[in-house]
Amino acid sequence: MDKSQGRVARDTAGELPPVVTHSGHRGLQLEEKLIFEQGVPGRIGVDVPNPPQGAADKLGAFARKEPIGLPDLSEPQVVRHFTRLSQKNYGIDSGLFSLGSCTMKHNPRLNEKMARLPGFADIHPLQPVKTVQGALELIDELARWLKTLTGMPAVAMSPAAGAHGELCGMVAIWAAIKAKGEGETRRRVLVPESAHGTNPATAAMLGFTVDPIPADARGRVDLAAFEAKLGPDVAAIMLTNPNTCGLFETDIKRIADLVHKAGGYFYCDGANYNAIAGRVRPADLGVDAMHINLHKTFSTPHGGGGPGSGPVVLSAALAPFAPLPYVVHGKDGFRLVETKEAGAAPFGRLKGFNGQMGMFVRALAYMLSHGADGIRRASEDAVLNANYVHARLKDVMTPAFEGPCMHEALFDDRFLKDTGVSTLDFAKALIDEGYHPMTMYFPLVVHGAMLIEPTESESKDSLDAFIASLRHLAALAKQGNQAAHFHAAPRLTPRRRLDETRAARQPILRWKPAAPPAPTAQAAE
Ligand SMILES: *Cc1c(COP(=O)(O)O)cnc(C)c1O
């Protein structure tokens, strides 16, 4: 694209002097105060009748002794506040969201329609089992799809996220090790350096020692280093495939065989299953346990949009240790197994109830509407789109490894060398271009990493527009005199550069009034 075209000169970004408004608003983009700052003591949004005179106080010792500290607001204030906040949000429903290793794909509205059916949405987990037969059948049917797609004999449905699934799979592995009398001796878990942070965190949380395995020059597990680390104290390897460099671990079968031979287990992080669903069955790769992020591979919303769901498929060796509860069906219909039954050795429970029902409905709706062939096609298209991005950018940005890639394209910062522009600056400039940045500085095995996962639900048109912006920025950075432009980005957002490290390390999670609080008598009724 011609750089002089299509660029709207906007206040600080162009030659015009910055626009300062009296209100602080910028056009129809309103500056939003915290809801606490908007509250006015005594203002109310609902008209709750006073209790009848002389009514007994049923709260007793539980009655609140101090004001609750919530802001007093009218209904329109509340509606406007949250509507304006939602308009500041950027999500997959607003535009391309290239966050790598996250699979931000379109969530078909059919899924939402199904999840809102009252028979699914309005049921309670403590309802008698005979009144929720349809919901149990849905869980059972989704489990059947997951087992068929992965080739695995069992699946634990209750984990509520990928990381929770890792915990589930690793506790099952630990239980199996303990059952063999090796609980005290097998205490080391091998984790490749490219792994998602949740892998070492999970192993460490269970008291295992985390032993990192380096990557080789091809971005895969260094097989020799891995073999050297095997020993009688190894409990498991936690391996992601495709890995977080967006590459298929070509030695995966050999890795599985070797870890098994050493008496350990193979935990596969299946968060990147979007690249291989319908094409490869993890069981055929020797996997013992693998979580599937329904909120990534099977479309359901994630991040701010909804809870996660991370069912874990288990091999025959681990199946007996699967957590409670689980659904079985017999001649009397579907039943929830809530206590230990003969032949099983459940390690316990992971969750109060049965899993994320709304996510189950969405994932099954996605599977049924795509069919087995459609799921395979989605994986192929995800890989095709990532390779298209890789191929269209490799002359201006620097791919970390040679292609082809799987579902995500990884670049490093060599193309920014001597420009004064860092990965962070580049990503911030992308925000001004109207795109949520790709994953930055992850995986750690690559310097200044930029990990782009377009997903299958982006069209060629939207990819071309995205690529054009990246090419424009890469060319601009390489002009050599544009570092200041990048350092100042983003310029067009309501807030510019924030101290993200401090926000993460010292979050201020509680609002405190600037002035002394109003006397109790004036507080909310
Ligand atoms: C997303 C992801 C996870 C964690 O999943 P959550 O649902 O966010 O807990 C783990 N590993 C990889 C590779 C991931 O991409």
Image: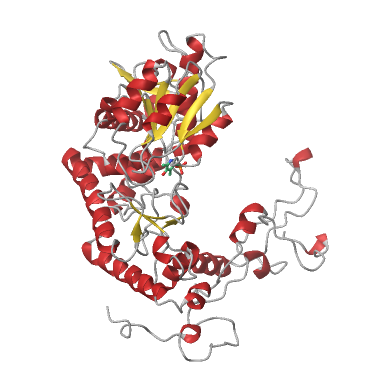
The spot of residue 314 in percent (x, y) is 37, 24
Q: Is residue 18 left or right of residue 344?
A: right
Ligand 1's quadrant is top left
Rendered image quadrant of residue 290: top left
Nearer to the camera, 419 or 366: 419
Q: Identify which residue is drawn at 35% across, 64% down.
A: 95
Q: Position of residue 317 (x, y in %)?
A: 37, 16
167 over 180 or under it: above or below: below
Using the image, determine if residue 321 lies above or below residue 500: above
The quarter of the rendered structure image containing the C terminus is bottom right
Does residue 194 appear in the picture of this structure?
yes
Q: Position of residue 138 (x, y in %)?
A: 31, 33
Residue at 81 percent of width and 61 percent of height: 521
| Nearer to me, 3 or 6 | 3
The answer to which quarter of the image holds residue 370 is top left
Residue at x-position 61% and y-position 67%: 74
Q: Does 397 appear above or below 496?
A: above
Evaluate whether residue 126 shows in this view: no
**Viewer-proximal residue, 68 or 483?**
483
Q: Position of residue 230 (x, y in %)?
A: 44, 22
Please tell me which residue lies in front, 443 or 418. 418
| Screen quadrant of the N terminus | bottom left
Residue at screen point 47% across, 18% down: 231
Colouring style: secondary structure
